[in-house]
Image (tube, rainbow, N blue to C red):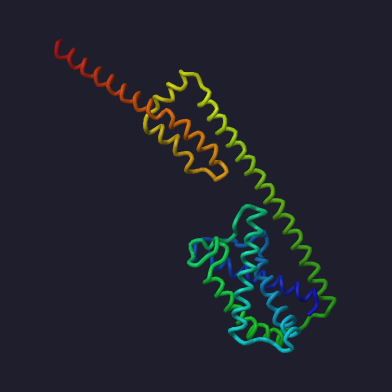
């Protein structure tokens, strides 16, 4: 099979994978989900999986062993292991470069860091058996081979569209990451400033901080529970600075309560005397 034919096969099954993912996620979530890393209607990981499977069972294994390998359990094992390696690697790369996960198996039993899981791996193994024993033979027997020039022109057009899609996607994600980073740095600056103000404030400010109510103090301290791990050190510093005045806040609250009670008692006594 020519390089252009393989690329066209990659694009076709990337589109088919996008259809499958979109239908599945839309059905399970009850609302429209446009799946995939790219903007266009393709999921490249499916196309890569199909093309690699085709090359392994039609080219590599026959060359190495001298005969075709299509025993169901062998095909299942090879495809399951191969899909796990591919899925884990792609997930790791996407998360490394874009700090995001496009799929997450954390809630699925027998998963590894949410990147792969045994049920999905077995599903891809079964799909591999279906492709090797049914779909590939059907395509070889019934799908006509395009003329070389037509195949090359189609591949060139699809490659241009894919390249444009990748360029737009990477640029947009890079801009998004830059904006998120700026927001994180801005938050860090504000948090660090607050910590410095608390730690270096004059006694009057510290006394005001000590007079915060229990609810106010709880709200301030609980900020650390809602931030990204990058903010942990700053949030913890702020939390420690606030908690340092916990006893003063309690004493101030008790004093205010005693004063309020005394004032109310005095007012009642004055009413009775009058």
Residue at (68%, 66%) from the top-left corner?
44
Residue at (61%, 83%) from the top-left corner?
74
Q: Quadrant of residue 211?
A: top left
In this rendered view, identify the residue nearer to me: 242 or 150: 242
x and y percentages locating residue 235 in the rendered image: 51, 38
Q: Quadrant of residue 136?
A: bottom right
x and y percentages locating residue 30 in the rendered image: 49, 62
Residue at (35%, 28%) from the top-left corner?
250
x and y percentages locating residue 103 in the rendered image: 57, 61
In this rendered view, identify the residue nearer to me: 229 or 31: 229
Residue at (79%, 71%) from the top-left corner?
154
With respect to residue 99, does 127 lie above or below? below
Q: Quadrant of the N terminus?
A: bottom right
Whether residue 35 sits left or right of residue 248 in the image: it is right
Q: Quadrant of residue 159?
A: bottom right
With respect to residue 250, does 177 lie above or below? below
Q: Residue furthest top?
A: 274
Whether residue 221 sits left or right of residue 190 in the image: it is left
How many marks overall?
0
Whether residue 123 sits left or right of residue 154 in the image: it is left
Q: Quadrant of the C terminus?
A: top left
């Amino acid at each position: 099979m020519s390089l252009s034919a393989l690329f066209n096969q990659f694009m076709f099954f990337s589109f088919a994978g996008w259809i499958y993912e979109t239908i599945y996620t839309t059905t399970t979530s009850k609302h429209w989900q446009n799946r995939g890393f790219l903007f266009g209607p393709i999921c490249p990981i499916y196309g890569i999986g199909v093309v690699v499977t085709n090359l392994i069972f039609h080219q590599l294994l026959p060359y190495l062993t001298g005969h075709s390998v299509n025993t169901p359990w062998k095909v299942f094992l090879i495809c399951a292991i191969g899909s796990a390696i591919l899925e884990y690697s792609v997930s790791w790369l996407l998360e490394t470069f874009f700090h995001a996960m496009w799929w997450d198996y954390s809630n699925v039993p027998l998963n590894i860091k949410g990147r792969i899981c045994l049920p999905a791996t077995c599903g891809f193994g079964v799909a591999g058996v279906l492709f090797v024993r049914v779909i590939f033979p059907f395509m070889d027997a019934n799908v006509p081979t395009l003329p070389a020039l037509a195949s090359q022109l189609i591949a060139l057009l699809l490659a241009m569209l894919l390249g444009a899609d990748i360029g737009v996607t990477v640029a947009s994600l890079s801009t998004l990451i830059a904006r998120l980073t700026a927001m994180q740095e801005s938050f860090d600056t504000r948090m660090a400033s607050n910590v410095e103000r608390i730690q270096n404030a004059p006694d009057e400010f510290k006394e005001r901080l000590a007079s915060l109510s229990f609810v106010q103090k709880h709200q301030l301290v609980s900020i650390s529970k809602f931030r990204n791990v990058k903010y942990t050190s700053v949030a913890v510093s702020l939390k420690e600075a606030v908690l340092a005045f916990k006893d003063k806040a309690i004493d101030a609250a008790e004093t205010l309560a005693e004063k309020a009670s005394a004032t109310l008692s005095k007012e009642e006594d004055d009413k009775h005397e009058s």
